[in-house]
């Protein structure tokens, strides 16, 4: 890994030639932020973040950039010398990267199925046939908090596998037709999860576009 010059005459060349790790090392070597270093770091963080968000499944790139931004915001001399304008821009970039990371996690079938209790929920709803089931019964079945069940149901509902209908103080849960098909497959393949549920979820391209647009508008110089 080479040494990145934050005072290069043509910072655009570094967009394709440099990597986040090089920018991190260069920032570590700064005694204080100056205008030229700020402009170059901002350019790289902006472009790299937008690109990582737009790519189909760049988990590693997102993690690298999150580490870079976290260090840049929290290193000791940044606390006193980093202008608020850049602090806000980079925090917004970090928030957009985190939103994309979570979107990818929900879009990954293996990540979904490997969440604690998800397979149990699918099988439990499948075993109840075609009837709606109170969410409070699921809380008792899993022996976890109501809040935890809400967290588990949310991604399944947004993925179109489960519907949730308010009834009094409770929620009524029901497998959709798609959810029933996938739940049946999950149960039959639970002994070999590596072969099941491929393609159950897909990356939401509209989310990619929205995040890409927001990060460009918010943190562009």
Image (tube, grey):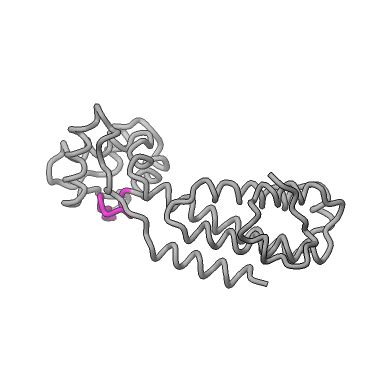
Q: Which residue is drawn at 41% across and 40% down?
A: 148
Extreme residue toward the right, this view: 31
Position of 25 relative to 142 (above/below): below
Q: Can residue 77 be seen in this view?
A: yes
Whether residue 161 appears in magenta in the rendering, the answer is: yes
Position of 3 relative to 46 (above/below): above
Tell me: 152 left or right of 84: left
Q: Position of residue 2 (x, y in %)?
A: 72, 47
Q: Is residue 167 visible?
A: no
Which quadrant does the C terminus fall into? bottom right
Q: Position of residue 116 (x, y in %)?
A: 37, 34
Q: What stretch is highlighted in magenta?
A: 156-166
Q: Which of 221 and 175 is in front in this view?
A: 221
Q: Where is residue 100 in the image (x, y as percent from the top left)?
A: 48, 55
Total marks placed? 0
Whether residue 158 appears in magenta in the rendering, the answer is: yes
Position of 74 relative to 84 (above/below): above
Q: Residue at x 14, y 46 (%)?
A: 131
Q: Residue at x 54, y 59 (%)?
A: 96
Q: Which residue is drawn at 21% across and 41% down?
A: 183
Tell me: 142 left or right of 208: left
Q: Which of 106 and 12 is in front in this view?
A: 12
Extreme residue toward the top, this view: 191
Tell me: 22 left or right of 216: right
Q: Where is residue 156 in the image (x, y as percent from the top left)?
A: 31, 48
Which quadrant does the N terminus fall into? top right
């Amino acid at each position: 890994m080479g040494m990145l010059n934050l005072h290069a005459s043509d910072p655009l060349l570094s967009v394709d030639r440099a990597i986040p790790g090089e920018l991190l090392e260069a920032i570590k070597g700064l005694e204080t932020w100056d205008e030229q270093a700020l402009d170059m770091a901002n350019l790289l963080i902006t472009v790299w973040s937008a690109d990582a968000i737009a790519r189909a499944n760049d988990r590693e790139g997102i993690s690298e950039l999150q580490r870079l931004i976290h260090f840049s915001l929290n290193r000791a001399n940044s606390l006193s010398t980093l202008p608020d304008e850049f602090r806000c821009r980079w925090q917004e970039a970090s928030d957009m990267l985190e939103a994309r990371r979570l979107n990818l996690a929900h879009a990954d079938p293996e990540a979904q199925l490997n969440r604690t209790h998800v397979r149990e929920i699918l099988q439990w709803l499948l075993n109840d046939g075609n009837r709606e089931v109170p969410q409070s019964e699921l809380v008792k079945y899993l022996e976890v908090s109501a809040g935890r069940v809400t967290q588990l149901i949310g991604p399944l509902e947004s993925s179109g596998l489960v519907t949730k209908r308010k009834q009094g103080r409770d929620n009524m849960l029901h497998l959709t037709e798609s959810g029933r098909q996938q739940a049946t497959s999950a149960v039959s393949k639970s002994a070999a999860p590596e072969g099941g549920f491929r393609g159950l979820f897909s990356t939401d391209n509209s989310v990619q576009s929205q995040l890409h647009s927001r990060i460009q508008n918010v943190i562009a110089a």
